[in-house]
Image (cartoon, rainbow, N blue to C red):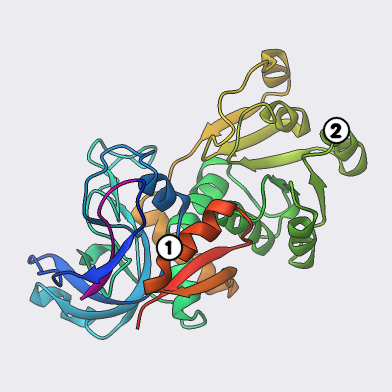
C-alpha cells in the first residue's frame, strides 16, 4: 500500500510503498478515504513529542470503509463507512486517562496511508450527512473540544461562552458545538478575517487579542462569561480570568503560549472560578460526540484538501497557521 512515512524528524515526509497491515483477532482493516492533520503531527515531525520512533506512519484522524476484520463477531462491520476513534486505552476512570493510554499515529502506525488497522471497538459509523473529508476532520479535534466543553466545563444551553483562538481545529469545534448546543457564543482571534468568519457561523461577537487592552473593552461591550475554552495559556490567560463571570469555568486543552505569570489568586477564589485541564477524551465521549454531530447535523469546517502524496504541502500550510478549519488528505 502507499503511505506517508516519517523516516526521520526534521525531514520531509516520504510517500512510499509499505506493507499492508496484517490483522490480529480483535482488529479491523480500514481502507482510508480521507485523513486529517493535527498539530500533533507537526510536533512529531519537528521532534517535539515524546516517544518518537523512525519510519512511523503519522495520522490520528481517519474515515473510510471497513475491508476486513480479524474475528467473526465483528463481521457486521465489513463494508461499513466508519470514523476511527483515535483515543485508545483510556481506562476505567472517566476522570483521566490510564497509564497505557495512547493516540493513533504514534506509537502505532496511523491514518496517512491507504489502509490502517485498529481494534474494532474504536470504530463508529460515519454520520450519513458527512462526506469522508468532513468525517475525517472530526475525530481528534472534535473529541478534545467535546470533553473540554461538555465534560470538563459542564456547558449547558443558554451559557455565555468565549472561545479563544477560533480558527484552529479544536477551538473551531468547541465554537460549533457551543452554538449548536444553544450557547451565546463569542470568540477571540488575532485575525479579523477569522473573527468575521466565526460571526458568519453564529458568533455573537469577537475581539482581536492582539489589540491593547482588548479584554477590558470587550468586557464593557459584551460582559463576562460562564464558560471559556482556551488552548494558549501564557500571558493572555490573565485576561480570560478577568472575563470569567462569578462561578465561571475555564477549560484549557493546550499551552502554546507557555506558562502563566502574574496570575492573581484573589480573582480566582473571589469569583469562585474553576480552572480545568483537559486532554483528548474517552471512547465513550467519542461516541457521544458523534451522536451530537448526527443529532445537530453539524458539519466540520474543512479548510483545504490535499492528495496524500502532497502531505508535505499540507504540513506547510498548517505550520503557517493561516487555516480556518481542518486540513485534510484524500486517499485514492
Residue located 25% across and 48% down the image: 89
Q: Residue at x 13, y 70 (%)?
A: 19
Which residue has dot 2 on it?
212
Quadrant hosting residue 242: top right
45 or 122, which is in the foreground?
45
Q: CA distance from mark 1 to mark 2?
A: 36 Å
Q: Label for residue 312?
A: 1
Residue span colored magenta: 1-9
Q: Are marks 1 and 2 in contact (CB under 8 Å)?
A: no
Q: Does residue 26 belong to the magenta stretch?
A: no
Question: Which residue does the image show at 52% across and 82% down from the upper left?
Answer: 129
Q: Tally the marks.
A: 2
Residue 32, quarter of picture = bottom left
Q: Residues within 10 Å of mark 2 (few under 14, many from 20)?
A: few
**On the image, which quarter does residue 7 sit in?**
bottom left
The N terminus, quarter of image: bottom left
In the rendered view, does 287 fall on the left or right side of 166? left
Q: Position of residue 3 (x, y in %)?
A: 27, 69
Q: Is residue 227 left or right of residue 75?
A: right
Magenta span has 7? yes
Q: Would residue 163 be found to the left or right of residue 216 on screen? A: left
- In the image, residue 205 sits, relative to residue 96, either above or below, namely below
User: In the image, what residue occupies the spot 65% across and 56% down?
Assistant: 167
Which of the two labelled residues, at mark 1 and mark 2, occupies the earlier sequence position? 2
Regarding residue 138, the answer to whether it shows in the image is no
Label 1 crowd (10 A; few <14 / some 14-19 / many >=20) = some
Give the left or right position of residue 257, taking residue 60 as reference: right
Determine if residue 176 is in view.
yes
* Up/down of 148 relative to 240, above or below: below
Q: Nearer the viewer, residue 275 or 114?
A: 114
Amino acid at each position: 500500500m502507499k503511505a506517508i512515512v516519517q523516516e526521520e524528524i526534521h525531514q520531509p515526509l516520504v510517500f512510499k510503498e509499505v506493507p499492508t497491515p496484517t490483522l490480529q483477532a480483535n482488529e479491523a482493516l480500514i481502507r482510508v478515504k480521507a485523513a486529517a492533520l493535527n498539530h500533533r503531527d507537526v510536533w512529531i515531525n519537528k521532534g517535539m513529542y515524546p516517544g518518537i520512533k523512525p519510519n512511523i506512519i503519522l495520522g490520528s484522524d481517519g474515515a473510510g470503509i471497513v475491508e476486513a476484520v480479524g474475528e467473526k463477531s465483528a463481521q457486521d462491520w465489513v463494508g461499513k463507512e466508519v470514523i476511527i476513534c483515535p483515543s485508545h486505552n483510556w481506562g476505567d476512570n472517566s476522570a483521566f486517562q490510564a497509564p497505557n493510554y495512547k493516540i493513533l499515529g504514534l506509537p502505532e502506525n496511523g491514518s496517512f496511508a491507504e489502509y490502517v488497522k485498529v481494534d474494532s471497538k474504536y470504530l463508529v459509523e460515519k454520520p450519513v450527512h458527512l462526506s469522508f473529508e468532513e468525517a475525517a476532520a472530526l475525530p481528534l479535534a472534535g473529541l478534545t473540544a467535546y470533553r473540554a466543553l461538555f465534560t470538563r466545563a459542564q456547558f449547558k444551553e443558554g451559557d455565555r461562552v468565549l472561545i479563544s483562538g477560533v480558527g484552529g481545529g479544536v477551538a473551531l469545534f468547541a465554537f460549533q458545538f457551543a452554538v449548536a448546543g444553544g450557547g451565546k457564543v463569542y470568540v477571540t482571534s488575532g485575525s479579523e478575517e477569522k473573527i468575521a468568519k466565526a460571526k458568519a457561523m453564529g458568533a455573537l461577537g469577537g475581539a482581536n487579542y492582539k489589540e491593547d487592552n482588548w479584554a477590558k473593552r470587550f468586557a464593557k461591550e459584551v460582559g463576562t462569561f460562564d464558560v471559556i475554552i482556551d488552548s494558549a495559556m501564557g500571558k493572555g490567560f490573565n485576561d480570560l480570568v478577568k472575563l470569567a463571570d462569578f462561578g465561571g469555568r475555564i477549560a484549557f486543552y493546550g499551552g502554546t503560549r507557555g506558562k502563566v505569570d502574574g496570575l492573581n489568586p484573589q480573582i480566582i477564589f473571589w469569583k469562585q472560578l474553576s480552572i480545568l485541564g483537559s486532554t483528548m477524551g474517552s471512547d465513550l465521549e467519542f461516541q457521544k460526540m458523534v451522536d451530537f454531530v448526527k443529532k445537530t447535523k453539524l458539519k466540520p469546517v474543512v479548510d483545504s484538501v490535499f492528495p496524500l502524496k502532497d502531505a508535505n504541502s499540507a504540513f506547510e500550510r498548517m505550520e503557517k497557521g493561516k487555516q480556518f478549519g481542518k486540513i485534510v488528505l484524500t486517499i485514492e
